[in-house]
Image (cartoon, rainbow, N blue to C red):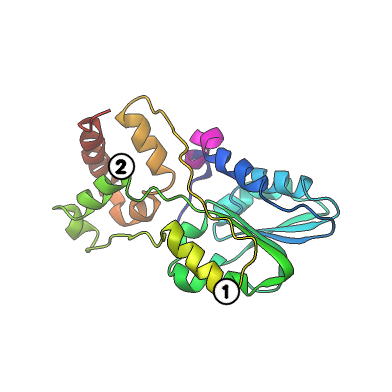
């Protein structure tokens, strides 16, 4: 998917809040071998690396556009690589991921795969947005099923792979994980109007559709903007 770092960063402070909550859950020890899955443009990975003394951190992302921006944050203890988050190799003391694995399919398989890459005593710290049932996302799915977009998209619709917190807990328990902490938190974002809603989802949820829509992208956004403007506050 062609990610747009500038579009994503329009709401940088709002998107960063869950990262700091996740960082506070990390058991900080020296000399950790760390991977940040979905490092994006690297600013937050830099903060992660700075918080982990004498550790080596790798930021992994599939987007060359994001990694191009991340390169300026590289240092002796932080490097960046392109790769598929769902095909992680190696063994790690800390597998960290903020707002990324919702783009990977089949979490019933993904979570055990990631867990298997932890060294003894390792930590799996992951934050996953669970907003696929928010009205703005529901309107996307509604619109892609309507004419003419169902034809333009050739029936494409991305279904979120995100599971319930109960399901993630069950998976981790079955794997023998210790000190399991799985919870849901709401981060309210008050947006001014439907234009602001479209700007927000254009940086994330709409990305898989933009390339497929081609010249019909403005028409699609106009329909979404109208629908969002008719939603109750």
Where does the magenta region start and end?
A: 7-14
Q: How many marks?
A: 2
Q: Position of residue 193 (x, y in %)?
A: 32, 26
> Closer to us: mark 1 or mark 2?
1
Above or below 91: residue 18? above
Q: Does residue 23 appear to the left or right of 154 in the view shown?
A: right
Q: Secondary structure at mark 1?
A: loop
Residue position marked by numbered label 2 in the rendering: 136
For label 1, the crowd category at 10 Å Cα-Cα, with few meaning under 14, some 14 to 19 and many 20 or more, is few
Give coordinates of residue 110: x percent, y percent.
51, 70
Residue at x 29% of width, y 46% of height: 217
On the image, which quarter does residue 196 sit in?
A: top left
Instruction: Tell me which residue sits at (37%, 55%) in the image.
Output: 208
Q: Secondary structure at mark 2?
A: helix
Q: For residue 43, what is the image quadrant?
A: top right
Neighbor class of circle 2 (other Cα within 10 Å; few <14, some 14-19, many 20+) is many
State which quarter of the image contains the N terminus: bottom left
Residue 54, quarter of the rendered image = bottom right
Is residue 147 left or right of 15 when viewed as pictured?
left
- Image position of 167 with respect to 87: above or below: above
């Amino acid at each position: 998917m062609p990610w747009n770092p500038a579009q994503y960063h329009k709401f940088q402070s709002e998107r960063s809040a869950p990262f700091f909550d996740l960082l506070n859950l990390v058991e900080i020890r020296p000399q950790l071998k760390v991977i940040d899955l979905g490092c994006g443009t690297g600013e937050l990975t830099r903060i992660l690396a700075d918080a982990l003394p004498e550790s080596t951190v790798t930021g992994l992302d599939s987007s060359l556009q994001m990694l191009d921006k991340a390169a300026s944050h590289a240092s002796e203890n932080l490097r960046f690589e392109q790769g598929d988050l769902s095909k992680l190799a190696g063994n790690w003391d800390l597998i960290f991921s903020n707002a990324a694995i919702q783009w990977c399919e089949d979490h019933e398989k993904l979570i055990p795969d990631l867990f298997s890459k932890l060294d003894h005593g390792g930590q799996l710290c992951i934050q996953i947005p669970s907003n696929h049932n928010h009205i703005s996302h529901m309107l996307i799915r509604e619109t892609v099923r309507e004419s003419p977009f169902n034809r333009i998209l050739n029936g494409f619709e991305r279904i979120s792979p995100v599971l319930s917190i109960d399901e993630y807990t069950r998976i981790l328990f079955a794997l023998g994980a210790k000190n399991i902490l799985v919870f849901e938190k709401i981060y309210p974002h008050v947006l001014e109007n439907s234009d602001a809603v479209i700007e927000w989802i254009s940086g994330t949820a709409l990305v898989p559709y933009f390339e497929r829509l081609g010249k019909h992208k403005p028409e699609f956004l106009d329909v979404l903007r109208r629908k969002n403007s008719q939603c109750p506050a």
